[in-house]
């Protein structure tokens, strides 16, 4: 597992993560495909208590939430590390209001994407 890229776990302990085998099951793909998604920076994983997992809020009923991979790509291309991306997503912003990760699941998703694009410039 050490060859897989992981970010520092900057999430609150109440923010769940899904172990990679569960992510594979959720997406109906082999776990090696999940490894590929991590290496291609389409998902971000953290290590918590010896378990490598992806934040649960990266997913919805359809699989990977609509804007997650695009937001990660925009910020990574702008020079942000995986840890910095998680920090952005999981830090409350009074002007949204709330955390960007929560806003991505609602009507403020476009605003979060706009802010990410502006940050990446």
Image (spheres, grey):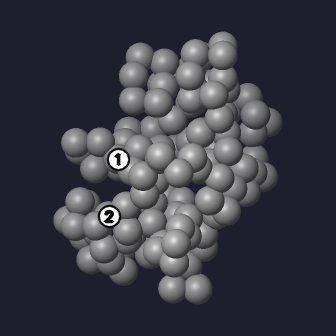
Residue 81 image position (x, y, % from top left): 73, 57
Residue, x 66% and y 23% (percent of image)?
93
Residue 42 image position (x, y, % from top left): 50, 58
Mark with earlier residue (2, 1): 2
Residue 23 image position (x, y, % from top left): 32, 64
Residue, x 78% and y 52% (percent of image)?
79
Checking the image for residue 21, the label placed there is none
Residue, x 51% and y 85% (percent of image)?
1
- Classify mark 1: residues with Cα within 10 Å, few (<14), some (14-19) or many (20+): some
Residue, x 22% and y 67% (percent of image)?
25
- Image height check: is 78 above or below 112? below
Instruction: Kindly indicate the quadrant of the structure image that contains residue 67.
Output: top left
Q: Quadrant of the C terminus?
A: top right
Q: Is residue 39 visible?
A: no
Q: Are marks 2 and 1 in contact (CB under 8 Å)?
A: yes
The front one of 32 and 94 is: 94
- Classify mark 2: residues with Cα within 10 Å, few (<14), some (14-19) or many (20+): many
Q: Which secondary structure lies at badge 1? A: strand
Query: Mark 2 to mark 1: distance in Å?
Result: 9 Å
The front one of 113 and 104 is: 104
Residue 102 image position (x, y, % from top left): 47, 30
The front one of 90 and 109 is: 90
Instruction: Kindly indicate the quadrant of the structure image that contains residue 106.
Output: top left
- Image height check: is 110 above or below 10? above
Q: What residue sits right under mark 1 in the picture? A: 59
Q: What residue sits right under mark 2 in the picture? A: 23
């Amino acid at each position: 597992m050490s060859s897989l890229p992981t970010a520092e776990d900057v999430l609150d302990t109440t923010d769940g993560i899904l172990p990679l085998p569960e992510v594979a099951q959720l997406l109906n793909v082999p776990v090696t495909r999940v490894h590929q998604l991590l290496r291609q920076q389409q998902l971000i994983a953290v290590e918590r208590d010896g378990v490598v997992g992806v934040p649960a809020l990266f997913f919805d009923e359809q699989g990977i939430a609509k804007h997650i991979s695009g937001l990660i790509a925009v910020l990574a291309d702008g020079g942000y590390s995986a840890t910095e991306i998680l920090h952005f997503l999981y830090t409350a912003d009074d002007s949204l209001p709330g955390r960007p990760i929560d806003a991505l699941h609602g009507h403020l998703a476009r605003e979060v994407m706009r802010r990410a694009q502006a940050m990446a410039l």
